[in-house]
Image (cartoon, helix red, strand yellow):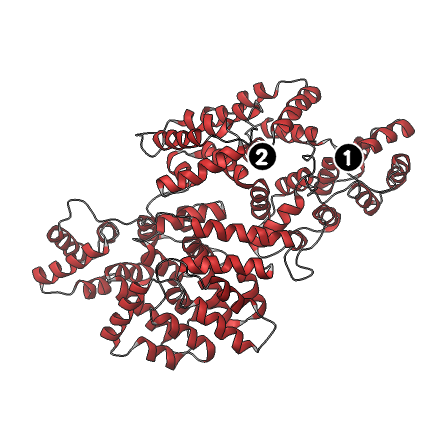
Amino acid sequence: MAKPAQGARYRGSIHDFPNFDPSQDAETLYNAMKGFGSDKEAILELITSRSNRQRQEICQNYKSLYGKDLIADLKYELTGKFERLIVGLMRPPAYGDAKEIKDAVSGIGTDEKCLTEILASRTNEQIHQLVAAYKDAYERDLEADVIGDTSGHFQKMLVVLLQGTREEDDVVSEDLVHQDVQDLYEAGELKWGTDEAQFIYILGNRSKQHLRLVFDEYLKTTGKPIEASIRGELSGDFEKLMLAVVKCIRSTPEYFAERLFKAMKGLGTRDNTLIRIMVSRSELDMLDIREIFRTKYEKSLYSMIKNDTSGEYKKALLKLCGGDDDAAGQFFPEAAQVAYQMWELSAVARVELKGTVHPAGDFNPDADAKALRKAMKGLGTDEDTIIDIVTRRSNAQRQQIRQTFKSHFGRDLMVDLKSELSGDLARLILGLMMPPAHYDAKQLKKAMEGAGTDEKALIEILATRTNAEIRAINEAYKEDYHKSLEDALSSDTSGHFKRILISLATGNREEGGEDRTRQEDAKEIADTSSGDKTSLETRFMTILCTRSYQHLRRVFQEFVKMTNYDVEHTIKKEMSGDVRDVFVAIVQSVKNKPLFFADKLYKSMKGAGTDEKTLTRIMISRSEIDLLNIRREFIEKYDKSLHQAIEGDTSGHFLKALLAICGGED
């Protein structure tokens, strides 16, 4: 195992057991497996309480005392996932990695995710130990086996990583950083096709410190993160491998936190992934992984394992985890630093927002109006033509088509579409045909009419729109419903929630950069000990509803420094109901608006049934603003593309129209 650098803090969850006696432990394990049945509790308690170095001594003593192989006995006595976990803990780390890779390339098919995870995340020293262990255990050459089981650029990058020759010098040349940024840009964005060799050379060989500066400079130079370029230029397993390399360069613990979350979310658990990571990181960086997990997913790794596994398997995993970060109701102190860094990235990132729907070239409103009239005339309706035209024109072009339609045929296109289409498709097409402000105004009106209020829709719209968009919505609402939006909100909501929505609906958020009051603002919302709940909510409202996004990002950084909490965590702890939900929506929107909408889209399609209203509203309202960014966040977080999610959750012409708006498969 690679030793931590001299003076570095130990960040594993498993430590050397004090007063260690390998002979006594060997005897305890022998007795636990003797006779009929086995004492699984005693086995898991002992093995998860010893370091890997100590387990190797136990193995040697077991053989000396009883002439038997401990791993063979454990395999015989235990079964299933629990056996895999315990046996995995008994192997030296390099031999554990060798076994995982051997399994990944053996038999029919290849486990590309396993190859990617191990080879993208290991240090030079760990790679060298892995290659030697593979040779020793299987009398085979690891590189030859990987070459024999993979192909293309994916294979080439794996071979580069297998050399274990990544530069390790922390002294970085500024000139070389700029040169690498230029080379990557020219190999991808500026080139017809992609020069994959350049990506492989730079990402496979440069030092981590150097590459972190390259990624920062790439964002400043091109206006997009390196991950976005990789997704746009590369594909398949090669793309996934390169993204894993980038994630590990940025933060190996964050990469593993994400892998663990994905292994347990949704239906079913990816136990092989869960076991491999918990075993391999237990003596390296499990505390860092736990901190990032708690910060990123707002729940502890411990609680997720507890809810997702069972029996001795669960008990052993929880021992490797080493503690529950939710138990005390607060973050690790170090987790606050993770939150701080997230806000720092959020504060400096300059990400170019892109929609998926663009103005059509060679636009001819006359021809479009005639084609739409023909599609709706006579018996039956040609939905395909309607979808093709409406989803492939910008909103401004659709308004021209409406005017042309009325001039030519003396008919209202919206009325005709309404009479010809029905259900989800009708709502989607009619929504696309409305000017954005009038569409938002209509969604707000619908959220407030009839019995009950759709608070989620009110929050989603009012917490995420810009000042200009809010002012346009106010005008549209007045024009369409002869009543001010403020009056409508006043009569349909109440209490503090009403005050917050009305504040947002004024569209008077400050614009521009941060100002000198960020420390005062952070203090204002950090003080949760004094005053009542109403006073706290008023202070949050004053700041969250009026300050600029850029200023708020810095305020939230200061907040982490002062309180050791992420602001979102504090809101969830101190507030409840609609007030909590609207404040969380504002914070998430400030942090990363495309991710906020990606989460909403995911929730609209997961589980039994689909929330078509939310799905339709977001796809329409973001199609020309940032739907491409939302797509990138969606696949990053949920390991499946928005295109795939829509395809698996909708059908018919509604599906076809949504996919056209989605704009492509990632």
Measured from the top left, where is residue 492 in percent x and y? 39, 79
User: In the rendered image, which quarter contains the C terminus?
Assistant: top left
Image position of 423 (left or right of 305): left
- Residue plotted at (66% across, 59% down): 326
Q: Is residue 55 visible?
A: yes
Circle 1 Cα neighbour tier, 10 Å, few/some/many (<14 / 14–19 / ≥20): some
Q: What x and y, as percent, mark residue 198?
A: 41, 26
| Residue at the spot 44% in from the left edge and 66% down from the top edge | 544
Q: Which residue is mark 2?
A: 121
Mark drawn on residue 75: 1
Left or right: 549, with 9 as reference point: left
* Above or below, 469 relative to 58: below
**Mark 2 falls on what kind of element?**
helix
Q: Is residue 35 visible?
A: no
Q: Nearer the viewer, residue 303 or 213?
A: 213
Q: Secondary structure at mark 1?
A: helix
Type of residue at label 2?
Ser
Q: Amino acid at mark 1?
A: Lys
Q: Give yes or no for contact between labels 2 and 1 (Cβ–Cβ under 8 Å).
A: no
